Image: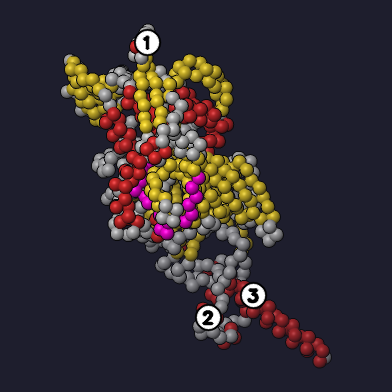
Amino acid sequence: MLYPFFDPVSKNIFLAQAEIDRKRSVNGEKTLTGTIYLSDELIDKIDKRWSIKFGNETYIIDYAKQMDQGNRKILDFDATHEFFDVFTKKQIYEEYNGSHTFKWYLDTLFKDTGYSYNLSVDVDALEKENWGMTNRMSLFADLITTAGLEYEINGKIINIKKEIGSDLSTIVRKGFNLQDLNIESDFSNFVTYMEGFGAFKDPEDQSKGRLHVTYKSPLADTYGILEGEPKVDERFTVEDNLLQNIKNTVDNSIAISLDMTLEDLQNVGYDYAMAQPGDSIMVINEVMDFRQKVRIIETTESFNIAGIKVGTDVTCGSLSMTDKQQAADAETSSLIDRIANGKDKIPPSWLTDFIVQNSEALNNARSELKFTEQGIIAVDKNNSNNLVIFNSAGMGISTDGGKSYENAITAQGINATAIVTGVLKAIDIEGVNITGSKIQADEFSAIVDNMVPNPSGGNWIKQGESRLIVNGNSFEFSLYNNSNTNLGSLFMDRSGYIILDGQGHQVGGVTDEVVTSHAIMTPLYDRQGWGLAGFYIGVDTTNSGELRVVDKKGLPNSGADPSNYIYANVRARGFLQQSTEKAKENIKPIEKAEIYKTKALEIVEETKLYEYQYKGDANKQIGFIAEQSPRGILSDEGNAVDIYKTAAYLWKAIQELQAELKEVKANASRN
């Protein structure tokens, strides 16, 4: 597969074959390592700040090593996702102190970076001292670690969540889609019992006691009481929250990591979700007596030179080592066995992140209802900033004590920070980013505004728009400026025409000329000394089926006279005329041909050459005029000179001239 590499100095794109490994992890890491096969025709070097486009995302190359292997040159490279490069190369040149909201920190970091974020969890305000005066990547990583969150990169959007990934129904089993399995266990911190101490009941009189909880793991019945260090944190005021915290510590006190090599069975038709970083999957290996649900923390995918994924290595961590988790796994074991043995279908992926988060939020909420003149208000007992109001105007959900409602339903419509649904039916959908696996409609059209900041502040300014129209008969993509003038279009219909028209511009050195079996028009523009390049490539179906390259102004229409076409120059390394006898019939020496009634030498002698100019072209030319030339060197229609026929006549003329020369020499020797 040819991957595009971008040179930021020349602004050109170079194509090269490469073998690539892509590494992704739950900490947001996205990197590439690869090997490029260098060649003079494609790419012969990699330099500073070059980038590669892979999976519709840009990676900046930060390491390159060129090697000579005798008969070929190769180059090993490492590349980092553009997000990390941007955030590492942009600094915060101020220091801040005190407490700020998590959103304030993120807004400060993401400002003027070209990236935006989507925060799907509530995070308490953070107090930082001397925050700043370093690169944004270090500050961002510190925020994520402090808040105990994870993030993933999706194009230009950074999704920040409590945990990324989903709880999949995917099964990984030895002999099915699991090649290798390595299990590494660390028992050094294994505990079965722990106590937690929270806030004092009366801060003014600590003798009244404090919040105190204990937790004993079911594994204590087998391994005994192994006590962990007490959890002491006065910020805990709710018993359930503190108990859950120490329970998680005990249940995950055994550190287990798994390294696996998976088979991607989607390539051979199995309909199941291929695991991604953050996903939870069921791993079964009867040989090692292992049956456990685990979470993927890192994946490395290998792609061969054809761009085909040939392997996936994953690193996992155990979700839980308690009997409760094992019992939960056992409840689904019968279904798992049926699926793994081919007796049942693998169901779709289970609850998505949004559904899980919303379900937990609703089930765990402790609310106080207030009946007021505004309506019914439900207030979170643990955080009074979280409230829901319901009245005759609609329903609103606030996280700032009712100052604003980012999620609301009223007569004017619905506003929401995120909507997750199985089916969405609408007449018009407007959005900045719309992603998905399939869009189906009788006719689909989209208009995307090109907005730029207003230098004087206020609302952004519209600079133009992009329009996409797709239906059962045609595909059209067009660019317009703010005056509604078409800047360029790409159009394709069922008749086989692909037209690239308008003012168009070269993009990164990739040419716009694409040859199809029917017709193409390319834009008119100047390309660094190549001159005007607007032309039409098409097959003339009305006459001999010629492939013709015509100037844009000479685009042939139905019934047009080919003699009036304005043809463009064609430059190539060579032009080869098919000449094998396997492609010919009725072969005879030229002396016996009907077309050879006049000697070639006489034809050459009688055919005049002219100086002329093509219409619309100031350059002077020297050559033939079809109407004043012998039929034998013309095209079938008689309006063009056939270079191959002309060369053949010249060849024959030389032979005739050589024969006359021999005869003269023979006569001279006899005299």
Is residue 606 in view? Answer: no
Residue 341 is left or right of residue 670, and the answer is: left
User: Does the segment drawn in magenta span residue 180?
Assistant: yes
Q: Amino acid at mark 2?
A: Lys
Residue 14 image point, x, y percent: 58, 50
Point out residue 286 in the picture as x, y percentages from the top left corner: 41, 55
Q: Which residue is rendered at x = 36% and y = 26% of the image?
A: 214
Taking the spot 55% from the left edge, 81% from the top edge, the residue there is 581
Q: Which residue is mark 1?
A: 207
The image quarter in which residue 407 lies? top left
Element carrying mark 2: helix
Magenta-colored segment: predominant secondary structure: strand
Q: Which mark is residue 323?
A: none
Q: Is residue 123 above or below residue 559?
A: above
The label shown at residue 650 is: 3
Sequence-wise, which precedes: disc 1 or disc 3? 1
Q: Secondary structure at mark 3?
A: helix
Label 1's element? helix
What's the magenta region? Answer: 159-184
At x 54%, y 34%, the residue is 86
Q: Which residue is mark 2?
A: 582
